[in-house]
Image: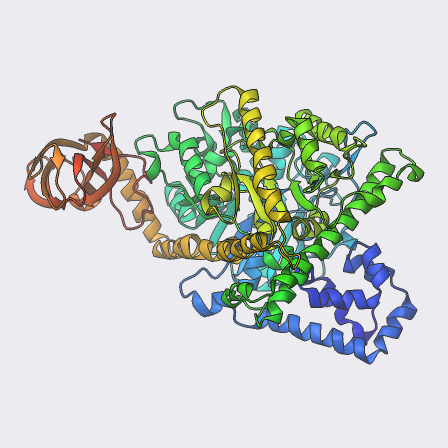
Amino acid sequence: MLPERISALGDLANNLRWSWHPPTQDVFASVDLELWESTGRDPVKMLGEVTKARLEELAADGAFCEQLGAAERDLAAYLSEDLWYQRRVQDGPQAVGYFSPEFGITAVLPQYSGGLGILAGDHLKAASDLGVPIVGVGLLYRHGYFKQSLSREGWQQESYPVLDPDGLPISLLREPDGARATISIDLPDGPPLVARIWVVQVGRVPLLMLDTDVEGNPQHYVDVTDRLYGGNSEHRLRQELLLGVGGVRALRVYCRLTGHPMPEVFHTNEGHAGFLGIERIRELTVEEDGPKVDWDTALEMGRASTVFTTHTPVPAGIDRFPRTLVEQYFGDKSATPGVPLEKLLALGTEDYAGGDPTVFNMAVMGFRLAQRANGVSKLHGHVSRDMFHGLWPAFDEAEVPIGSITNGVHAPSWVARELFDLAAAQGADTHTDDVDAFWAAVDKVPATDVWTAKRQLRERLVLDARRRLTKSWQDRGVARAELAWISGALSPDVLTIGFARRAASYKRLTLMMRDPERLKSLLLHPERPIQIVIAGKAHPADDGGKKLIQDIVKLSDDPEIRHRIVFLPNYDIAMAQPLYPGCDVWLNNPLRPYEACGTSGMKAALNGGLNLSVLDGWWDEWYDGDNGWAIPTADGVDDVDQRDDLEAAALYDLIENDVSPRFYDHDEDGLPTRWLEMVRHTLKSLGPKVLATRMVRDYVRKLYAPAAVNSRLLNADYAGAARLAAWKKKVRAAWPSVRVEHVESSGVGDAAEVGAMLNVRAFVSLGELDPDDVHVQVLHGKIDSNDVLTDVTVKDLSPAETYDGGRYRFDGDVELDRGGPFGYTVRVIPKNELLTSVAELGVVAVA
């Protein structure tokens, strides 16, 4: 029990804003610096271990109480003041439900495995900083993700420590009478599954986490939230039922108990939470005294207000369940009673060329249940449109309705405090959501200060790495007396390259090992040595990934080079926070284009690190030739070994001939002037782009606000949704009769001249449809060597004349803005102001 005068410590500890707010961290460090460090900077754990005498001493310490009061007032202002969303967004949703299977917010709440979770955590933190009214929804895993260690032979070993919810910065949601708030879901092999609801306060954003370790649940129900990404397909399906169906129910309970506005928009981060759309349909169609609306109307209501983000660039990364398993969970004893099984199954079926009709595809359902969908970089948007083209086969890839919003990272969580201090010393306000002044300060910071700060950060990384190395070697069974060499491992004065990511095969952890002797020569170069810090986990079931780790560990065990290349086990947020600032170069060499985005290089860039990367994910989009280096790729080389050899050689060449010489080229003042020029350019060219606040603003402007507007247009009594559903039904029924019968044109020959006017007359049959139901369009552009239209421009034609039998003429003129080989065609597509894409209905009639 905290003394009354310092009771605010509990409030500060239970709002995770402390994890990205250094002044609040300073308060906890003032309580007991040694305990703060030994508890892993976990304020809840630390406060549980502080002696009563120390607490009483602090309560009597005027200076500490003043420091604590300032932090308390700062948090209160942060939680209440108008921020960007309140000041700038006029038509945004009153709330957004953001669903993800994992959230990486702080190391003290280990509910993440990698990039997806870290991205979700940064999304919530940036939303909090901007005042965006998001409510996160996830699961609370009893074991979190595994802790990684190494065997003597360098093989990954997993352990699953049990997490005590009472020792975490979370609280149970309770009913007014004090009883715990719960939700339940019917399952086919027992009583209803019951889950409690935990609330995590992430600044201004509440995060709801569901947990099935509830008295009365049979053990196989308790195990549903045992660990992240564990178990077989049925276990995974149960987790996704809990996340999607249970998550919507938990949101309703939370809003009822707290008065929080009900979400107008639902965002599913990957397909894991896709069943939330089914639960929302159930809410609209099933009641004790009869349905409110029919299936089609409910589907339109749900689609209009749902955003789906896909993160995978490969089919193997998508959750696909046996159709029979889904039938079992949504059949007689359904998780969503009253929802027609066949309609549900149709949403996830792969009923397109090359699809497998025996599986239920969660991503396919995600696209069908969401009117707005996106990939997580420009290149990934292209890859996703190609990957899911089968859902819209009548349209070119460019018109497949999957956009892109490139990921970003939460700077206050990842940028070293010393770098913020450099900007603040030049007058930049580091606590505002208007960051222009911050980037303007980049050119003002003296080069000596930048270089000195980077060396300090490199030294911090070296000391942290040595500590971790010592523990790792001891865990591998080596006596401490044999580890004297670790005191000389790595150096704060050597060019430091970081490489940390999941040990998936496409990320090519061992590409740097293709020529071990060449690598050794770089590590041990007498004038320009490099050192490499490597980290990453393999999925427990991925022996191939574990073998990659073992190979890199064996290399780093070599006494000749072990002081220059290290593998650090158990990569997590706590390791990452000194790793990114301490690296000079961030290496990324995936097999292009299998990196959807990849945000680790963004974190390095914000800390003055230069990227050395294959042009994939975000780097393909924002590399400009001066903010790092692009590793050439052997595109078109089919032989895997040859391709890897070529790309590894290119990597070695870049390090030897470009990266190292620039880092070690010092002027008379001992400064690497050209290197620091690249650092400044990196901060200015990438800094504003890679921020999670930019990303969240993009989601608000491009997806959340338009989704809310569309949802409102369908209106609260569902009449708008009913009209839209009826219109779609009419269009689909009539479309077989829609065709372009004849096209006439004049004014342009086979070769166009700039300024020439093309006159088009299209005769179309619309059957039961009216001209207001369709766009009749001319598509024109260049003709390539394969006689295919490229650089296409689209223009609507106007109704000009009506004939019998549902036939019409549409006319239009097109002024050409380019010369050369020219072609055009005419098409008919459905038209409705509530459609977000020309391909939404998937139908088109072409001349």
Left/right placement of residue 671 relative to residue 777 reads right
Rendering coords of residue 40 (x, y %): 79, 54
Q: Quadrant of residue 194?
A: top right
Residue at x 47% of width, y 41% of height: 620
Left/right placement of residue 836 relative to residue 286 reads left
Left/right placement of residue 705 relative to residue 643 reads left
Tell me if residue 253 comes above or below residue 330 in the rendering. Answer: below
Rendering coords of residue 298 (x, y %): 41, 45
In depth, the one of 191 and 719 nearer the eye is: 719
Residue 489: in sight, yes or no? yes
Rendering coords of residue 410 (x, y %): 58, 56
In depth, the one of 276 and 69 nearer the eye is: 69
Residue at x 50% of width, y 43% of height: 619
In depth, the one of 722 and 684 nearer the eye is: 684
Residue 101: in sight, yes or no? no
In depth, the one of 296 and 824 nearer the eye is: 824
Q: How many marks?
A: 0
Tell me if residue 450 comes above or below residue 617 in the rendering. Answer: below
Q: Please identify the residue farthest to the top as the structure is shown.
A: 639
Q: Quadrant of residue 399?
A: top left
Rendering coords of residue 401 (x, y %): 37, 41
**Which image quadrant: the N terminus?**
bottom right
Q: Please identify the residue farthest to the front as the structure is shown.
A: 668
**Which image quadrant: the C terminus?**
top left
